[in-house]
Image: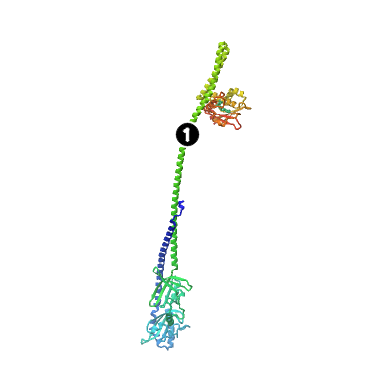
Amino acid sequence: MTSRRTSPWLFPLALAGLAVVALLLAGAERLATRHYLAEGLTRAETALRLTVNVLDGQLKRYEALPRLLAENHDIVRLVTEPGNLTHRAAMNRWLKETNGVLQSSDIYVMDLRGDTIAASNFDRSDSFIGQNFTYRPYFSDAVQGGQGRFFALGTTSGVRGYYFAAPIRDGGGQVAGVIAFKVGLDHIEAAWRDDEHRIIVSDPDGIIFLSSDPRWLYAGLLPLTAERLEMLQKSRRYAGAELKPLPQDTAVEQDIPLMTLTAADGLRHEYILQSQLMPDAGWTVRVLLDTASLRAQVRIVLAATLLLMCAAGFAAVLVMQRRRSRAELERRVEERTADLARVNRRIETEIAERRLTEQELRRTQADLIQAGKLAALGQMSAALSHEINQPLAAARNYADSATILIDRGDTVRARENVAQILSLVDRMAMIGKHLRNVARKPNQALQEIDLNQAVAEALDIARPRLAAAGVSVAVNLPHGLPPVRGVAVRLQQVIVNVLSNAADAMEGRDDPRVEVSAACDGRTVALRIRDHGPGVPAAIADRIFDPFFTTKQVGSGLGLGLSISYNIMKDFGGDLSLANDPAGGAVFTLLLQASGAMRAAAE
Ligand code: ADP
């Protein structure tokens, strides 16, 4: 089958198809990645803006407070009269109160040596009172008349905070002490925990000091060099906290900055990175948005694309297959049509041959009929010549002897001879009459005949012949038979003929018997005449009704009896047929029309 053969193009075609699919997928991957990463970037940008605003706001809230408080007389008095313990105690309480109002972490005052002389947490066990903070950069900045700011992990409290400090000037404008504010940032960090993105804030040394993920706290984004570590140690910014490096990779994919962090458990996470420097504080705020969900979305898009392509491919294959099967169907239809046309042609030629054969048969039949006629003519002339020559010869003998007898004057015997001659002439005339009967189609009017009577009269006529052969006849006709249509004399002739034939057939047989019976079906009456002879051989059964057909010796029969009888029965609108009885013997059936009136009554 041509449709089943694998095309040589199939393999390269499949390869090309795969290449196209791969290209399409790669394109789709690029587009989807760009789309989702850009979307992530926008989210990260928004989050960054918000975070920076919040942080900035928080810092700005407290920025001006140290300077304001430094101008307060009581504060100035605190540093100018360090020995006044009553004032100190009063100031401690006031600072505590103010700290509560301002919601800062701690407020405290240091003298020029850096010793804390008053603090809002004076009454706590981890009070700053007596602590020295000269190592903190905010202190040195403020002592030098500047504005001090510093982020650090509290050395005493261990709590992270942003420190603001301002110089306290005496009446002469000289720096006499330093007032410092510590602001906690824990609550801001706590607010980040629930966000989908991570936020880290690092100091200028790259140390992360605020992080939505506590695991990254105090990790260094910049290399932790010995120099840097020493500096950090000096300011004791992170007190005793252990600093560790945070392994990271930065990359840019489709213009989107990415950062990969390796977590403590060794798992690598990729994030979209958005960062901003807060110049006043020296902090860098980074917002990290995990790309896992974005990349998952990209994969979903890819899977959908692949599915779509598969569906399209499947549809294409389906269409192709349908087209192919239609082509196959058309081919088969054409084949069948061609087959049919071939068969048609063959039938036509066969018909033509049959016609020819038929014509030949007809010709042969015509030839046979012609031959049959000739044969019949031959038989007829043989029969006729015998039938006529014999009486002619006899008549001649009688005439000769009559002449002699007349010459002798024996008129009596001469008269006898003449009578013999007359009977012979009559016999020849009978033959002529017979022949006329064969040829003639009498148009005598049909009468109603009583079958019982017709049978009885025919038996009377045939009796001498039947008696000579010793034949016994049993007639058994049912009562109430309807009259039949025909001509009485001619019907008798038929019955006589059939009875004589029966007598002939049973010649020399033991117990020669003939049974005559009848049956009526309302429309017709069938008269059966059965003998106990040898029956009619099948070979000649269809010929016995032919004129001049006889199996009897020349001179015994003309072969006209059944032929004439058959014609008579047809004239009556009936039939004459032969059947051999299974038990032996011939059965001749004379079929007759039941007469009109009776038929109507029977119906
Ligand atoms: P014919 O009696 O002069 O021979 P028919 O036409 O009456 O002419 O009969 C034709 C032939 O039919 C007979 O020669 C005979 O062979 C056959 N035939 C007729 N009746 C019988 C019969 N009852 N039994 C056997 N053969 C018969």
Q: Is residue 110 visible?
A: yes
The amino acid type, in three-letter code, at marker 1 is: Glu
Q: Is residue 173 above or below residue 331?
A: below
Left/right placement of residue 553 relative to residue 225 reads: right
Q: Nearer the viewer, residue 351 or 174?
A: 351
Q: Nearer the viewer, residue 449 or 514?
A: 514
Asked which quadrant contains residue 575, the reply is top right
Q: How is the image coloured?
A: rainbow
Left/right placement of residue 486 relative to residue 247 reads: right
Image location (x, y in percent) of residue 131: 45, 85
Which residue is outermost to the bottom? 83
Q: How many marks?
A: 1
Image location (x, y in percent) of residue 399: 55, 15
Which residue is outermost to the top? 409
Q: Is residue 121 above or below residue 598?
A: below
Left/right placement of residue 272 relative to residue 402 reads: left
Image location (x, y in percent) of residue 64: 38, 80
Q: Is mark 1 within 8 Å of ligand 1?
A: no
Which residue is outermost to the right? 510
Q: Is residue 522 visible?
A: no
At x 46%, y 46%, the residue is 336
How many C-alpha atoms fall within 10 Å of the one at disc 1: few (<14), some, or many (≥20)?
few
Q: Nearer the viewer, residue 130 or 45?
A: 45
Asked which quadrant contains residue 207, the reply is bottom left
Q: Is residue 15 above or below residue 541?
A: below
Residue at numbered disc 1: 360
In what element is the residue under mark 1?
A: helix
Q: Is residue 89 above or below residue 43?
A: below
Image location (x, y in percent) of residue 177: 40, 85
Figure quadrant of the C terminus: top right
Specify the quarter for ligand 1: top right
